[in-house]
């Protein structure tokens, strides 16, 4: 297993490190300390364009080679970043057209990272050149094990730009998709407000305007901007595969926060790498949800440096960040716990951001493994050293293990982009918050979860959740039907099937192409402000631990063959169906026409478990998070205590503690922010 750190050696050359006689002396000391920490890999160079090409066409990669040589002498491998996230000042002065123009027509200026328009021909030309020269210079270095393309794509709100090069590519993209102007006008519904066009170059970019743009056009704009990012990464990947075919390729991603299709981007990568912001999250389920989202981006054709099948954590924050209103320290033990949460959910490499707090620049007070003063606090360093020693013990057992999942949540970028547009039925509804309610209930019952697009193969999952698929194509609707027809259990929710992939509302009933699957039609829907709520009245065996409210959105359902599980308690639609279940083929389709509080979703998971669909990994106290990785003949369980106090777990047979080698029997107290890693008893399943 790889364990490492993000390293910026350019920030530790004399006068900031080293000496006048040996300006780069700090690099050797850093490598020695990295080995002490147990590191065997670093990431390097992702912001080095202006240092590798200080003048147009004059390349110097010797300093990077010296760093890699030093790392080699200390047994440390290298992931090398292509430096296209931060173009040099001379390039923006020579080609100011690469600077991005915003929706107001204003240019965003140079002097920082991501000051680029990804549709700029000049930017592509210079990006190709720096990547080719970098690969030719260092691609055969024995320490190089992988490439990271660019850095934090789409960050700092740079997914879209409105330059003239963008306008040209936008029109070309539309022509390739629609082929004729007539089809464009028809499928985008441009006759609304009389905004039809007679030529491709008349189609506007959705810049700032007196009121909203056509929603179908805005959706296509989001798709176009996403395709631009994916194509830019694909261009670099093609160069690197041609010049260094044995070095796998990745890039670092956040949890679907940036506005591009992360699934599409993962398809052009060999393996997924993520940025973990666990240290700034307050709830374990929120963190776990983001990890599982990112792990799910690439489920097949994974090629990592060591041949393992998981994802990498390219940036695990080693301490506080520097961009919140209050940047509090990470408490002792919490970094270790968060690192194990990542490993437990499939990470096969963890690199901390960053090695040392820099003495200058905008990140000088960002947390790091080491502080500015090497003789200062070693608290974080010592905790990292402990993790490194433990991962050496775990690594052989974790090799080739996978996260096994029974449940899946469907997510579509197209759908979320549509829901984020202006003038929604209820601006207080958030798809992410709705997904989190469902995910948290699964997480709290220790059910492992994948995320998938609607067009993926779903047969392996016992239960699939499809929350608020406002936009769904006929083809994707058919895939959901196929899944249920063949024995699957599908749970869908309100705000589903309102438009097709062209953002056109069906005239055959809502949910679009799914009324037969659910045995119902949504005839109207009522939206509620956060200060108001309806209530649910349940029928039959559905368990209710609390009174469950109906919040934000209430579908008024007309049953057409389905079983009614709950109705609304008040208003003019009191007694109307709110939750239903329909048998379809060999499976069941459940429809939840409203959003409720967290207790409802816990009850929902309990009900589904009683139906025989889901099984918790272990029986443990509710405030212990359990994850599991497995391979043939082996299951490894991770128990995490996110509390500030010990939690007692009871084992009814001897268990093997991986980290200490001891056997555990009876009561065991997991310490505050503690971790317990156990394997399944050879004589049978673990019971707790």
Image: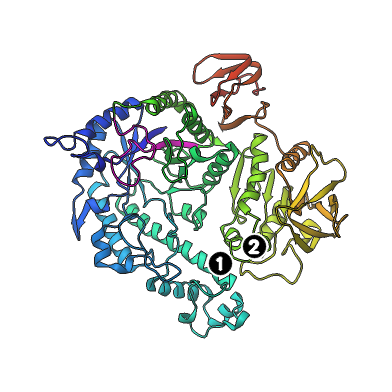
Residue drawn 41% across and 51% down?
A: 152
Lower position in the chain sequence, tag 2 or tag 1: 1
Q: Is residue 589 left or right of residue 244?
A: right
Give the image quarter of residue 455. Answer: bottom right
Residue 88 placed where, x, y %? 26, 57
What span is in magenta?
347-373
Work out whether residue 65 or residue 120 is closer to the camera in this orientation and state it: 120
Residue 536 location in percent, x, y? 82, 48
CA–CA distance between discs 2 and 1? Answer: 11 Å
| Position of residue 509 measured from the top left corner of the image (x, y, whole percent) | 76, 67
Q: Classify residue 337 as left or right of residue 580.
A: left
Q: Of the numbered discs in the image, which one, if any, rests on residue 14?
A: none
Q: Is residue 570 visible?
A: yes
Disc 2 to disc 1: CB gap under 8 Å: yes
If the image is split into quadrants, where does the C terminus sit?
Answer: top right
Element type at marker 2? Answer: loop
Q: Which mark is residue 219?
A: 1
Q: In the visual, does 450 lie left or right of 201?
A: right
Q: What is the quadrant of the N terminus in the image?
A: top left
Residue to which mark 2 is pinned:
471
Q: Position of residue 436 (x, y in %)?
A: 63, 46
| Residue drawn at (75%, 64%) of the image | 510
């Amino acid at each position: 297993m790889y364990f490492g750190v993000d390293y910026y050696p350019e920030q530790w050359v004399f006068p900031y490190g080293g000496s006048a006689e040996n300006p780069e002396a700090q690099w050797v000391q850093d490598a020695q300390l990295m080995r002490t920490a147990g590191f065997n890999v670093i990431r390097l160079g992702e912001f080095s364009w202006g240092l590798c090409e200080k003048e147009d066409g004059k390349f110097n990669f010797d300093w990077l080679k010296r760093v890699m040589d030093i790392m080699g002498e200390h047994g440390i491998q290298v992931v090398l970043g292509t430096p296209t996230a931060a173009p040099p000042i001379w390039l923006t002065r020579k080609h100011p057209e690469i600077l991005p123009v915003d929706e107001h027509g204003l240019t965003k200026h140079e002097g920082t990272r991501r000051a680029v328009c990804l549709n700029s021909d000049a930017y592509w030309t210079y990006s190709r050149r720096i990547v080719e020269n970098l690969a030719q210079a260092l691609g055969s270095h024995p320490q190089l094990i992988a490439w990271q393309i660019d850095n934090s794509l789409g960050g700092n709100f740079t997914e879209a730009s409105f330059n003239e090069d963008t306008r040209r590519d936008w029109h070309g993209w539309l022509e390739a998709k629609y082929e004729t102007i007539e089809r464009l006008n028809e499928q985008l519904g441009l006759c609304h407000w009389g905004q039809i066009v007679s030529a491709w170059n008349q189609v506007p970019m959705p810049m700032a305007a007196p009121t909203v743009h056509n929603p179908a056009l805005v959706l296509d704009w989001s798709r176009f901007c996403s395709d631009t990012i994916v194509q830019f990464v694909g261009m670099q990947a093609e160069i690197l595969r041609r010049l260094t075919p044995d070095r796998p390729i990745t890039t670092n991603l956040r949890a679907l926060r940036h506005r591009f299709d992360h699934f599409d981007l993962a398809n052009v990568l060999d393996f997924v790498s993520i940025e973990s912001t666990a240290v700034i999250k307050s709830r374990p389920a929120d963190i776990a949800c983001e990890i599982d989202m990112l792990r799910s981006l690439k489920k097949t054709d994974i090629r990592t440096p060591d041949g393992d099948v998981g994802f990498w954590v390219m940036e695990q924050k080693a301490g506080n960040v520097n961009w919140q209103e209050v940047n509090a320290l990470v408490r002792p033990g919490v970094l270790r716990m968060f690192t194990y949460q990542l490993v437990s959910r499939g990470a096969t490499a963890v690199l901390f951001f960053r090695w040392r707090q820099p003495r200058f620049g905008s990140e000088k007070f960002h947390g790091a493994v080491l502080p500015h003063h090497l003789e200062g606090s070693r608290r974080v360093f010592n905790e990292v050293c402990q993790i490194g020693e433990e991962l050496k013990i775990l690594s052989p057992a974790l090799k080739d293990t996978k996260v096994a999942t029974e449940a899946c949540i469907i997510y579509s970028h197209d759908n979320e982009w549509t829901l984020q547009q202006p003038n929604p039925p209820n601006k207080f509804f958030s798809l992410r918050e709705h997904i989190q309610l469902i995910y948290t209930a699964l997480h709290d019952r220790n059910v492992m979860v994948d995320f998938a697009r609607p067009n993926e193969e779903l047969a392996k999952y016992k239960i699939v959740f499809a929350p608020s698929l406002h936009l769904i194509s006929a083809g994707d609707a058919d895939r959901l039907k196929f899944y249920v027809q063949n024995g699957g259990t599908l749970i869908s929710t309100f705000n589903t099937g309102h438009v097709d992939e062209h953002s056109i509302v069906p005239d055959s009933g809502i949910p679009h192409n799914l009324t037969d699957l659910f045995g119902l039609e949504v005839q109207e829907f009522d939206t509620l402000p956060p200060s108001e709520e309806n209530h649910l009245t349940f029928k039959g065996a559905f368990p209710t631990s609390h009174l469950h409210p109906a919040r934000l959105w209430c579908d008024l359902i007309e049953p057409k063959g389905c079983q009614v599980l709950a109705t609304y308690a008040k208003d003019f639609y009191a007694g109307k169906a709110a939750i239903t279940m329909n048998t379809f083929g060999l499976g069941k389709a459940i429809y939840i026409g409203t959003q409720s509080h967290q207790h409802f979703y816990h009850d929902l998971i309990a009900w589904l478990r009683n139906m025989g669909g889901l099984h918790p990994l272990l029986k443990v106290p509710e405030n212990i998070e359990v994850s599991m990785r497995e391979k043939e003949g082996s299951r490894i369980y991770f128990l995490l205590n996110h509390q500030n106090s010990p939690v007692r777990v009871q084992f009814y047979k001897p268990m093997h503690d991986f980290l200490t080698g001891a056997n555990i029997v009876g009561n065991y107290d997991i310490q505050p922010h503690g971790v317990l890693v156990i394997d399944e008893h050879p004589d049978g399943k673990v019971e707790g």
